[in-house]
Amino acid sequence: MSSTEYDDTKLGAIMPRRSLAGLSLTAAAATLIAAPAAAQAAISASGRLDRILKAGKLRAGQYLSYRPFGFKTPDGKPAGFDVDLTTMLADDMGVAPEFIDNTWEGIIPGLLADKFDIISANLAITVKRALVVQYALPISFTSSAFLVRANQATEFTSLKAFNHPSVTISVLIQDAVHHILTRFFPKAKVVDFNTADEAILAMLTNKVTCSAAEISYLTEFSQEHQGLKVIPIDIPGSSSPAAMAMVPGADNIHLLSFINTWVHFYYWTGRFQTLWQKWTPWSPVPKVEKFLAPV
Amino acid sequence: MYHLHFEALLPYAPLLIRGLYVTFYISIVAMAVGVVCGLLFALARLSPLFLLHIVARLLIDFIRGVPLLVLLIFIYYGVSIFLGINIPAMVAAISGLGIFYGAYLAEIFRAGILEVDKGQIEAAKSLGMGQLRVFQRVVMPHAFRAVLPPVTNSFISIFKDSSLVSVLAISELTRAGQEVVIATFRAFETYTVVALTYYSIATVLSFMSSGVEKWVRRGQ
């Protein structure tokens, strides 16, 4: 992908080559052109960002059932990558974060039902989701992997072995990894489960051949239990960025542009590296360029 | 070979205890809502006003025809979007459980009220008591003793059905168990503890319910 038409010398290696700000500005401009009445409303003082600042509270939809991104400590407090990220954002806004837990298939309906202002739960960017929510710039990167028993690992010497009709794969319902499975492993059968740990339990109890999920979650799981092997899905094009999401519309124009600005600072000030190293220390920090052309 | 490690759950006991507290809270408040709803539905069904009777009948039929899980999700997401307001998870849970059990209790209350001996009511009326007085002094005390056993059984049911509100991400006992599994990756041990907790409390409630039944039957 040629990047000679963009100037990246000023900000060095951490600034994405292709300007993501340019993309978001184009999207915002398109929204304004398409809805002039909405644009008029947006210019007025009210909007979700103003309401959040006035209320002093940012309601963030979370999925606290997925280590290391979201989970609860023994005394019931939310913790994880997403919780830290949301706290940083809320601190910079000068408001208090409020974490609202969800089921995975309920998180987008919850956003649309105004149960919270944003989703900051490591929501992977997919085209289908983009039809109903508005994504901000990506704040992280999700790669997927298979979890198999160690004694089965010999049957799966290459990823191609998973693309077979005899293979059943258990997945969390509505997880973005479905797109990867449909695209690269179409012959395998996919079985949905309500929670990620139920999906893994199904594999542990031999109901399915393997389980597919985000690689950090599976890595943590395999560290807790013996006899499991994590096989990364490192096919080019099989990973995707994750971003915060909000309801599309004029009400959120300022909130979206604010969060996009904040995400730039999140990279420039090294917060992404800090969070990544804190929560997934076994994994090298991905280069931010990956967010443009996910690999 | 799965190695059992119950001790891995110990640091997370506070999560489970808080979950149990939330379960009790939801069960008790939903029961109260259910009793009130049931009473209102029952009185509406017994009402001479045709419109009230029909509306109550239709509502009860609808609520009894929808599974509790679907009703909870419908209230939390569907009604929320339709009315344009955010119904908090706890409100959706308690109202869903309460209305669901209210529809069932309505039939129990209706039967209890109708069972009261007609002779008693006629005697009260012949003494000059008004309609309301008759209801207050004669019907309610009899009906109360008649419905108490099924109502206490309903409470045990609500206590167990409260596990369904975990689908609204409320941290009652079942979801607290799920959270402990997420944190410890120990599914078998956690779900065993959760199941035993439900079982032991349901058994205690069952004993109390039999005690209530004996008390109701005393002197009969």
Image: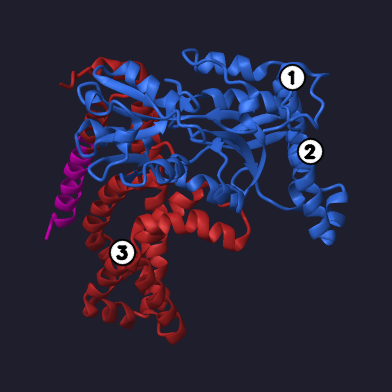
Chain colours: A blue, B red
Which residues are drawn in magenta? B199-220
Residue type of the residue flagged with mark 3: Tyr
Residue type of the residue flagged with mark 1: Trp
- Residue shown at 76% from the left, 33% from the top: A19
Q: Nearer the viewer, mark 1 or mark 2?
A: 2
The residue where tag 2 is placed is A22
- Residue shown at 74% from the left, 23% from the top: A15
Depicted B173 relative to depicted B143: above or below: above
Q: Residues within 10 Å of mark 1 (few under 14, many from 20)?
A: some
Q: Residues within 10 Å of mark 3 (few under 14, many from 20)?
A: many
The residue where tag 1 is placed is A268
- Specify whether B30 is left or right of A254: left
Q: Quadrant of residue B187?
A: top left
- Residue shown at 27% from the left, 33% from the top: A201
Location of the C terminus of chain A (image quadrant): top right
Depicted A198 relative to depicted A70: above or below: below
Foreground residue among A4 and A276: A4
Circle 2/circle 3 CB separation < 8 Å: no
Depicted A45 relative to depicted B217: above or below: above
Foreground residue among A46 and B27: A46
Asked if marks 2 and 3 fall on the same chain, the answer is no
Q: Chain of mark 1?
A: A
Q: Nearer the viewer, mark 2 or mark 3?
A: 2
User: Magenta segment: does it hold B209?
Assistant: yes
Depicted A1 relative to depicted A116: above or below: above
Residue B104, label in figure: 3
Prevalent SS, magenta region: helix
Q: Quadrant of residue B176?
A: top left
Residue type of the residue flagged with mark 2: Gly
Q: Nearer the viewer, mark 3 or mark 1?
A: 1
